[in-house]
Image (spheres, grey):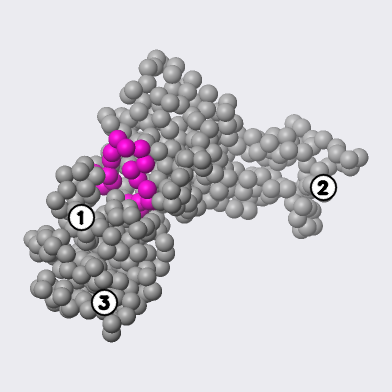
Amino acid sequence: MSSIPVVALVGRPNVGKSALFNRLIGDDAAIVSEEAGTTRDRHFSRCEWQGRSFWLVDTGGLVEDSDLPMDVAIKRQVKQAIEEADLMLLTVDAKAGLHPSDARIVDMLRNSRKPWVLVANKVDDPKSTDFFEFFNLGAGDPVPVSAANGKGSGDLLDVIVDKLPETADEPGPEVLRVAVIGRPNVGKSSFINRLLGEDRLVVSDVAGTTRDSIDTPFTYHQRPFIFVDTAGLRRQSRIDDGVEFYSSLRTRRAIERSDICILMIDAVEGLHNQDLKIATMAWESGRGMIIVVNKWDLKEKDDKTAAKFEKECVEKAPYLKWVPFLFTSAVTGQRVTKVLDLLLEVEAERAKRISTSEVNDALQELLARRQPPQAAGHEVKLNFATQVETSPPAIVVIGNHPDLVQEHYIRYLHNGFRAKWGFTGNPLRVLMRQKGGRNE
């Protein structure tokens, strides 16, 4: 990330920063709501314009005079975003007019001694909107935009690119996207903060503090990661307002956008049905998976507790047999950093490709031990097998009656291939195909 400039959106609550963030990145990554203070954390997204790349950061609304814990935490996050940024976009509400908080934020930006641009949002029609009072801020010409209809967004992007520092966006290894998923209040944000060694995400005792999916870049052994801290998925009956509903959708989307999911569960509470639903969603989506059992410091245990915990999880969901478990404490830091090496191991398993000759040899060994049972009076023959995909791995087995191969025999093949090559932490798909090319 160091070679790519950072642009931070800052401003008081409800001036449309998240809507502008979504408009500039061409997506709906940040939740937009009429409720002030919806954005609580920093949201990263990579943007490209005129051949230039930069990270755009959405921040929570600054409430200068509030002593409420959440407002204090947001203020700390915004200050850190300013420290990391190469350019700031002070967003103001042209319809509401100049507010005393706008001037106080200007003072904060000037003290940073970094370049910034004044952006007048909600200017749906520049000819009929009077936004010139913002000249009183002494920040030069405001750039008028409308996040709602997109007017002026191209001009704003031109200004951003023009003011970005000259840096070389050097090509590097592909980014590994890691989604941290789980029920609310299991410690996902605390875990990422401990892992990164800084308070990147707001942490609170209030369940559900994280509402959006938060993209956080990180580098380990010259390998770039993006950690996505997601809002916890609740049972559908508990999703009783619009923001919670959209948060659950963001979590599902975060799973789809990730390569590997870290499912975090509470060591004291154990594996809940909702944990299993989240795990199954990620597994069936073809994502790699690691299970992190957090709050392990609070668990009463002996030398067999971890093995018993893992066994109980596998009994509830047999596919978890292939998923590595890590027992950690985000509070004490116990074994937290081990997840990085484990992620690289799961990624290597995910990308593993087995030669066709090896796959066929394994198939013949399995057939020698147990032939597929006859079905509907037909003799079922399996002739050939090959790995057709990686990330996640998939093996195709070709035979004369693929539709008659029973599910328990497919599991037998699956377990046999697993015994040979592992593919640890990843779903392995065994697909049956008709000899001669016709799919069944």
> Magenta residues, as a range?
198-217
Q: Quadrant of residue 381?
A: top right
How far across and how far down the image is residue 352, in percent?
A: 53, 47
How far across and how far down the image is residue 183, in percent?
A: 43, 38
Image point (17%, 68%), residue name: 98
Q: Amino acid at mark 1?
A: Leu
Q: Quadrant of residue 61?
A: bottom left
From this viewpoint, which residue is outermost toward the bottom?
A: 127
Q: Which residue is mark 2?
A: 401
**First along the sequence among labels 3 and 2:** 3
Q: Is residue 11 above or below residue 267?
A: below
- Neighbour class for label 2 at 10 Å: few (<14), some, many (≥20)? some
Q: Amino acid at mark 3?
A: Pro
- Neighbour class for label 3 at 10 Å: few (<14), some, many (≥20)? many
Q: How far, Cα to Cα, is label 3 from label 2?
A: 65 Å
Residue 62: which disc? 1
